[in-house]
Amino acid sequence: MESYLRQNWIKQRTSVGQQSTVDLKMNKSRNIAIRERERERERERERERESTGIRPDARPIIPSMRYSQKLLNVVEEMNNAIPKKLDRVDSLTEATDLVYSAAVSVCEILGMNIETTCNHRNTGNEPPCKIGLEGKIVNIRKKIGVLHTYLSTDAPSRRILRSVRDVG
């Protein structure tokens, strides 16, 4: 009888010990998650401070993002956080700064690279279609040069022959 009681007591102690380690692991993971949220909030505050007062044309471009469940969750979280901060906004400029900093936060949470310098592709007044056409013109001129060299020489080199095959 005593051995039976001892075995049950040992089983209870080990099961209690296992439960406590499981509880400790769960508490540890919760604490890690809480610390991570606090760090993320601090990063968000820093981003908000950094993006405040920057001219819209001098801000880095926010890259386009592919749809994913993680993106949806992060955007929903930001959408829930923005109205709380909009109560303290007094001007349209502050509102745009807030929305921009939220977008930057989403990008950084997802691990996307946001360039700190302003590299707008179309910095001049030229429309994008004109830039594309000029690029095509340059490529066509290269092909014309290869064809002209092929036709004007008696014995074209292998490189020219290969280029002519690629053009045609």
Image (spheres, rainbow, N blue to C red):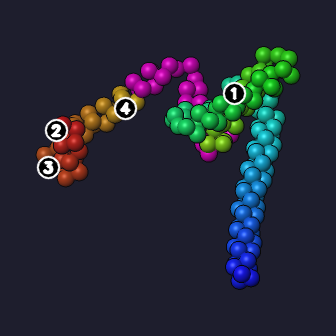
Q: CA distance from mark 4 to mark 1?
A: 46 Å
Which residue type carries mark 4? Val
**Which quadrant of the structure image shows residue 14?**
bottom right
Observer-nearest residue: 51 or 149? 51
Q: CA distance from mark 3 to mark 4?
A: 26 Å
Q: Are marks 2 and 1 in contact (CB under 8 Å)?
A: no
Give the answer, above or below, for where 7 lies relative to 103.
Answer: below
Task: Return the disc, 3 or 4, that comes first in the chain's sequence.
Answer: 4
Q: Residue furthest bottom?
A: 3
Identified at 55% across, 32% down, the residue is: 64
| Position of residue 74 measured from the top left corner of the image (x, y, whole percent) | 64, 36
Q: Nearer the viewer, mark 4 or mark 1?
A: 1
Which residue type carries mark 2? Leu
| Residue that label 2 marks | 151
Q: Nearer the viewer, mark 1 or mark 3?
A: 1
> Bounds of the magenta span?
111-134
Residue 91, can we see it?
yes
Observer-nearest residue: 98 or 138? 98
Task: Return the disc, 2 or 1, that comes first in the chain's sequence.
Answer: 1
In the picture, the disc for residue 155 is 3
Q: Nearer the viewer, mark 2 or mark 4?
A: 4
Residue 97, can we see it?
no
Which residue type carries mark 1? Asn
Task: Return the disc, 4 or 1, that comes first in the chain's sequence.
Answer: 1
Label 3 secondary element: loop
Label 1 secondary element: helix
Task: Return the disc, 2 or 4, that comes first in the chain's sequence.
Answer: 4
| Residue that label 1 marks | 79
Identified at 27% across, 36% down, the residue is: 143
| Residue that label 4 marks | 138
Identified at 73% across, 32% down, the residue is: 101
